[in-house]
Amino acid sequence: MSLAESSITRFLAEHTLNRQFGEEEFSRLGAFVKLSLIDTTGVAVAARDEPLVQSLLNSHSANARNEGAALFGGGPKFDVMTAALINGSMAHALDYDDTLPWFQGHPSVVLWGAILPLAQNLGCTGKQAMEAYLVGLEVGCLLSQYMGNEHYAAGWHGTATIGRNAATAACCRLLSLTTEQTVNALGISGTNSAGFKTSFGTMCKPFHSGSAARGGVEAALMAQAGFTGSSEVFESKLGMKGLMAGVGSNSVGLAYLSHHPVEKLVFKYHAACHCTHAPIDIIMASSGTHGFRADDITDIKVHCSQISMDAAGNPDPKTGLDAKFSIAYAMSSALVKNDTGIANFTDDQVDDPDVRALMSRVSVDVDETLEGLRTTCAITLRSGETYTDTQDPNERTVPIDEQTAKLVGKFTSALKSLMTADQMQALREAIEGFDCLDNVNGFMAATELQ
């Protein structure tokens, strides 16, 4: 499908409202939506006690109430917009949630962050929430197509910019707005789209996803109440394309994608920035194959793309959050501790002397021939051997049954210290039957920590 450049905002609004899912299509895609939900729920509840979450709870305590939208993990309830902010931030606090290159960021934390509070408020069914997720994901990928990868490369965090508008579309779908209202909602969210990659390694990165979720709810509710915005917020030379490094591709449509976006979600199995995953996988696979340990290594040369360097090139992280954006720390910690879970990226682990000793032998440089997350590592041992490998975590295809088993394992590992086995089983059952729920309140109750 080709697109007249002047109509992208309206095109996305019409797609939001007119997209229909047949029974077979919804069943097929719904299985992947549930994977996104079990992953998002697990990492969100596991982050409930993170400092940035506690800071958000404290700074917004005046908005707490007995009746309202529930948070992941329970506790006080809030108005819909505040709940979206906190849930969206909480789910991204560990940087352990799914990603999607076609979205230029982390889609599920933004979308579920916005959808679940609004769905609670409206009394929407589980199936309606899932359809809103699919529509929001599609709109995000369509907008990403239109903007092009130049947008992310210029320093914009797609989770914040693309994500805010995707969340807006999902909320407009839940509210059953008119086309004109949805155009206005996108005009509102579009003009508020922001988020800089310089925030990586700080609390503002997860705040990006929470702010985008809140912004999506806010834009849809404002448009419903009659607030207006630009009808060409994306395509104008003074709009998102013109000012935020968009290329304005006319080849926009789901038909240009090889699969539905939900089928291409990339789930994380290391609790760090996705740009660290190829180096982690390379050093762990090489160690497993060749039997070396950290003390056997004299030198590690990492070559990555500029995007990976910008996101995860920090050579000297100071905090656990900072360490998630350090290729040198992430791969060194993985080998030294034989683990890449949540516990490795805490403030008390970042100065581990054995990890720091290996980090001192790691160099990270940009190779202009590498794109995206593709990374090459050359590991030289004291014995003289050098082992070299190149990997890209986005190039792997994992069958859904295998993906499900891995995500259940990740979910269990993240929550086993917070929930009993019976609680975890009840939550998994609520997710598995999510499409049959009359409302989402029971699901949110199942996330509560006792």
Image (tube, rainbow, N blue to C red):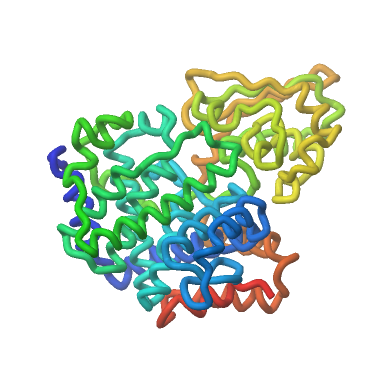
Residue 47 in sight from this viewpoint = yes
* Residue drawn at point x = 47 percent, y = 27 percent: 371
Quadrant of the snapshot with the N terminus: top left
* Residue drawn at point x = 49 percent, y = 68 percent: 78
> Where is residue 415 drawn, in percent x and y?
68, 64
**16 vs 299, nearest the viewer:** 16
User: Residue extending furthest bottom?
Assistant: 438
**310 vs 177, nearest the viewer:** 177
Quadrant of the snapshot with the C terminus: bottom right
Residue 407 in sight from this viewpoint = no
User: Residue extending furthest front?
Assistant: 62
Left or right relative to 79: residue 173? left
* Residue drawn at point x = 26 percent, y = 34 percent: 241
Left or right relative to 244: residue 94? right
> Where is residue 357 drawn, in percent x and y?
83, 27
Left or right relative to 11: residue 23? right
> Where is residue 65 drawn, in percent x and y?
52, 73
